Image: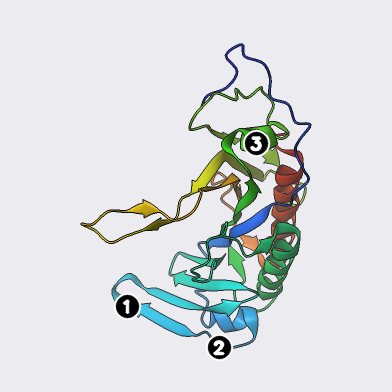
Amino acid sequence: MEHGRGTEPLSISTITDAPWLVESARLTVLNPEKTPSGLWQGLTGSSPESITQQTLHGLTREEGPWEGGLLVTEVRPDRFDVVLGLSPTSERVIPSIGAVDDVLPKFTAVCSAWLAGEHLHRASRIALGSTLLCPVESRIMGYERLQRFLPFQLDAEAQDFFYQINRRRASEVQTSLQLNRLSRWSVAQWQFLHGTLPGPITPIAEALTACRLDVDINTAPEFTRALDSATLQAVLAELRVLMVEIYTKGDVK
C-alpha cells in the first residue's frame, strides 16, 4: 500500500457522484444440512441454459442469462455458490451488469426467497460478496474518488495502490455471531489490444480506468452453531446492509 509521503493532499472537488457498477455479485452458503438440487431453477423459476456435472468432485454447475448478466450456480456436498457475473461481450467498455442500487436488491431478493423455502433447513456459514467499479478519467481521478472512502491521505504520485482491511462487527441478528467486513480498494485499468501472436500486439483504444471495490461480508468461522433458514434470511439481509454501508460510507469502523 502506498499513501501520503508529505505531498499535497488530493483534492476531491472535481469528483462526481457517479454510481458504483456491479461486475459480479455472489452468495455462498457453507455446510448446508441438505445438498440442494435444481438450485438455478429454484432461484429463477426457469430452466438453466446449461448443466455440467463432475461426479468425481460432486459438483453440479448450472448457468444461464438472468437480469442482464450470467447467473451461475455451483453445488458441492459442503457448499453452494450463486454468482451473477458478466455475459460475454465484445464491447470496449468498463465491464458491468448495472448500477449496484439496481442489481444488488434483485440478487439478494431471489437468494432470500430461495432460503425461505424447504430446500436447505440449516447451514453453518453464509457470505455475500461483490466486485464494484466506478469509471473515472484517469488514475489520479481514481485516487481522488477513493479518497472519499478511506481514512488516510492518498498520494497522487503513488502507483499500484491497493488497500485491504477486515473490520469485524457483532451481528444484530444472532447473539455471539461476529461478521467479517472485508473490503479491498484499488484503481484498475482495461487496455484493449489488437493482433495475433507471434505478430505485433497494438492498443486499439485508450485504456479505460475505474475505481475497484471488492467486498466480502461473511459470518465468522468461530461460530459453530448451525443457522436455521429464517436466521440465514435475516443474516443475509444484515450482510446486504453492511455492504451498502461500505460502498456508500467507505472504510468505517
Callout 3 crowding tier (Cα within 10 Å): few <14, some 14–19, many ≥20: many
**Which is nearer the eye, 175 or 115?**
115
Q: Which mark is residue 47?
A: 2
User: Helix or strand or loop: what does disc 1 sit on?
Assistant: helix
Provide the secondary structure element on which disc 2 rests.
loop
Q: Which residue is mark 1?
A: 55
Neighbourhood count class around disc 1 (C-alpha, 10 Å): few under 14, some 14–19, many 20 upward:
few
Disc on the earlier residue, 3 or 2: 2
Q: Earlier in the sequence, mark 2 or mark 1?
A: 2
Q: Residue at x 68, y 32 (%)?
A: 144
Relative image position of residue 33 (x, y in whole percent) = 53, 69
Quadrant in which residue 137 is drawn: top right
In this rendering, is residue 252 above or below 122?
Answer: above
Front-most of 88 and 191? 191
From the image, state whether disc 1 or disc 3 is nearer to you.
3
- For badge 3, the amino acid type reads Met
Q: Which residue is pictured at 76% across the width and 35% down the height?
A: 14
Residue at 76% across, 51% down: 241
Instruction: State how far apart marks 1 and 3 are (Cα).
Output: 49 Å
Q: Is residue 200 left or right of residue 234?
A: left
User: Which residue position holds label 3?
Assistant: 141
Q: Is residue 176 visible?
A: yes
Amino acid carrying label 1: it is Thr
Pinpoint residue 99: horizontal percent, then vertical percent. Answer: 71, 60
Query: In whole angstroms, how far apart are the C-alphas of marks 3 and 2?
Result: 44 Å
